[in-house]
Image (tube, helix red, strand yellow):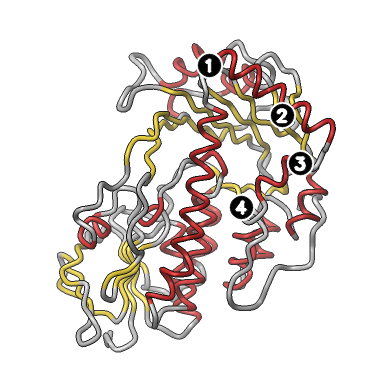
Amino acid sequence: MSPSSSAVVIGGGIGGLAAAAALHLAGRPVTVLERAPSLTLVGAAISLSPNALRALDVLGVGDRVRDLAAWQGDGGLRAPGGRWISRTDAAAAAERFGGPLVLLHRAVLIDTLAGLLPPGTVRTTAEARLADPGDERRPARVSTPDGDLEAALVVGADGVRSTIRHTLFPAHPGAVYAGFTTWRVVIPVPGVRFASHETWGRGRLWGTHPLKDGRVYAYAAAMTPAGQHAADDERAELLRRFGHWHSPVPEVLAAARPEDVLRHDVHHIAEPLPAYHRGRVALLGDAAHAMAPTLGQGGNQAVEDAVVLAHHADDLAAYTAARLPRTTAVARRAARVARVNMTGNRAGIVLRDTLIATASRLRPGLLLRGFDGIADWRPPQPPYAAVRTDTDQR
């Protein structure tokens, strides 16, 4: 592979594959190096908001993803006893932001993105190290057990614990613990019907959403010291923390097996990087701006990064200028939301729930404004979003 226009992407997750697809569509030879033995070894589900779907439109798979995903219907925010604090209107959200919020398994999105790449593009079980970031006069160089690769562009998409980030910015503190851990399950729960919801308790939350294939995606979070794990198993831990909450939480937990439950501490980049590039290397996704999941924007911002990076592949300073302010603002907003929905202060919880309920009753669309400037983003290149904005399940 000639280094004159080639690209090497380190990391075969959503952001890395989206970047590889965007660069391939732009005519660049691309190699993806993924250290895991398979691309399918991925977690649970991912919500995609209109901003990310518009980025996927640029890659030519936006409507395919819309067809594969569950379109989020009406739902809302609840209290642990089951009381609705606020209700969401999916049609109003789609109209405001130019498209629906959809939900699908990460493996489906990974397979869709990988399908855009020529055979042989992705190398699994491929450890990679950035040996030289390069500059205007020489290509970047990546070391692998099979030899070195030189490239005009190296994309660091190696996640929250990015070694590429540390190589580029060794003085930066990197990702730090956000103060809470998360659990996720994707399982069938036969005979249970429910409206999509997120439920906020004292220092903890739970969400339940249907997937198109009939399974249920549920997630939970709780304030807890870093590095802890259940003495028995994580399903038992969830039962202790959430088993007494409203339906369908107990039904989901009853249907889950211990091996169905994934647990991960949440780390985020609290101090923004000085840039998202150095030399011929660019960072994207969690490697650049790991954020709390409270806005559901981590993967969405990575897909945005991918199409913007391909657009500015010959001018990485322009990529940084386009992405660093936006992702920093989204990450800070996600951190603020986490402080609100994960609070453990009883008086603060009462005030929070009262204010949300009152605002939702008096001005039903008020809470949607929290996604203004996020979900209405458009990529710098066509094509733009598909015209479909209905919220029927596809």
Q: Residues within 10 Å of mark 4 (few under 14, many from 20)?
A: many
Give x and y (percent) for residue 298.
49, 50
Q: Residues within 10 Å of mark 3 (few under 14, many from 20)?
A: few
Label 2 with label 3: CB-CB less than 8 Å: no
Q: Is residue 45 above or below residue 98?
A: above
Q: Is residue 11 left or right of residue 349?
A: left
Image mark for residue 48:
4
Q: How many marks?
A: 4
- The residue shown at (68%, 37%) is 210
Distance CA(mark 4)–CA(mark 3): 21 Å
Examine the image and state in which quarter residue 321 appears: bottom left
Q: Nearer the viewer, mark 4 or mark 1?
A: 1
Instruction: Identify the mark nearer the N-term, 3 or 1.
Output: 1
Q: Is residue 43 left or right of residue 160?
A: right
Give the residue type at disc 2: Ile
Tag 1 residue: 345
Front residue of this view, candidates 211 and 289: 289
Label 2 with label 1: CB-CB less than 8 Å: no
Instruction: Identify the mark nearer the N-term, 4 or 3.
Output: 4
Q: Nearer the viewer, mark 4 or mark 2?
A: 2
Tag 2 residue: 356
Give x and y (percent) for residue 243.
57, 13
Tag 3 residue: 366
Instruction: Identify the mark nearer the N-term, 2 or 1.
Output: 1
Q: Residues within 10 Å of mark 2 (few under 14, many from 20)?
A: some
Give the residue type at disc 4: Leu
Q: Is residue 15 above or below residue 384?
A: above
- The residue shown at (51%, 51%) is 107
Give x and y (percent) for residue 190.
69, 27
Label 3 with label 1: CB-CB less than 8 Å: no
Label 4 with label 1: CB-CB less than 8 Å: no
Give the residue type at disc 3: Leu
